Image (cartoon, grey):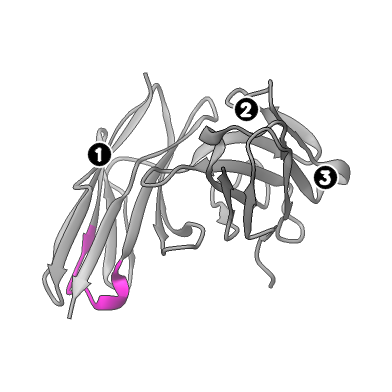
Amino acid sequence: EAGVVQSPRYKIIEKKQPVAFWCNPISGHNTLYWYRQNLGQGPELLIRYENEEAVDDSQLPKDRFSAERLKGVDSTLKIQPAELGDSAVYLCASSPSAGVDTQYFGPGTRLTVL
Amino acid sequence: EDQVTQSPEALRLQEGESSSLNCSYTVSGLRGLFWYRQDPGKGPEFLFTLYSAGEEKEKERLKATLTKKESFLHITAPKPEDSATYLCAVRTTGNQFYFGTGTSLTVIP
C-alpha cells in the first residue's frame, strides 16, 4: 500500500514569492491534515479536512495561507506571499476517517524562504 | 490552556541501557494520547495510541503507559537503530491536536 505522497520534497524561494505544496493521501483515507514543523519543535496543526470540507482551520494564518481539497482526495496548501518566518517543514497526514485516531504522515516538504 | 510537555529534550544511552521518556499533558479533556517516532528528514511514524489511565501498549523494546497526567515511553535494552526523536501528541475531546517538542534519543553502540 502506497503511503502519503508529498511534493516537492524541497523548495527554496525568495520572500514575497508564492509557493504551493501538494499532498496525495493514502487511498480511501477521508481525513487529511496539514501540519507545520519548525526546527526542533513538534508539528503544529494548520488545517484538517473531512472529505472536501475543512472542519478545523483555526490555526491557519488566513491572510497568507490557503488550502483546498477538491473532490476529497488530493490537497494543496498555498502561501502567498511567503515570509522568512514561513521556513519550516510542511507535513501532510491522513487517516481513514474522523473516528480513527491513527495518522499516517508523508515525508514532508522542507521550505526555505530567503 | 492545553499543553503537552516532553522530557528530557535529549537522551543518550549506551546500547542495552534501559530508560524512560516522559510526556506530561494538561488538556481540557483527553480523547487519546499518541506516541510517534521521527527519523531525520522523515515524517512521524505512528507507534501507539492510549485512551485511558492504566492502559499499556507494547511493541518490541517499547512500552507506553498512561496516567491521568502523563505518559511514559519505556525503552528496554535499546539498540542503535532505536535512535530517533520520539514525539508525544494528544487529541482532545474537542478534536484539537497538540504535539510535544519531542525527545531526541541517541543509542551508542
Whether residue A87 is visible = yes
What distance separates the C-alpha of mark 1 from that of mark 3? 36 Å
What distance separates the C-alpha of mark 3 from that of mark 2? 19 Å
- The answer to whether B41 is drawn above or below residue A54 in the figure is below
What residue is shown with label 1?
Answer: B70
Please provide the residue range marked out in magenta: B74-83
Residue A64 image position (x, y, % from top left): 69, 26
Badges 1 and 3, same chain: no
Q: Residue at x 21, y 53 (%)?
A: B10
Amino acid tagged 3: Gly
Q: Residue at x 52, y 29 (%)?
A: B96
Q: Earlier in the sequence, mark 3 or mark 2?
A: 2
Amino acid tagged 1: Glu
- On-image quarter of the C terminus of chain A: top right
Q: Are marks 1 and 2 in contact (CB under 8 Å)?
A: no
Task: Give the SS element for disc 3.
Answer: helix
Whether residue B67 is visible = no
- The answer to whether A113 is drawn above or below residue B44 in the figure is above
Task: Give the SS element for disc 2.
Answer: loop
| B99 left or right of A34 in image | left
- The answer to whether B6 is drawn above or below residue B27 in the figure is below
What residue is shown with label 3?
Answer: A72
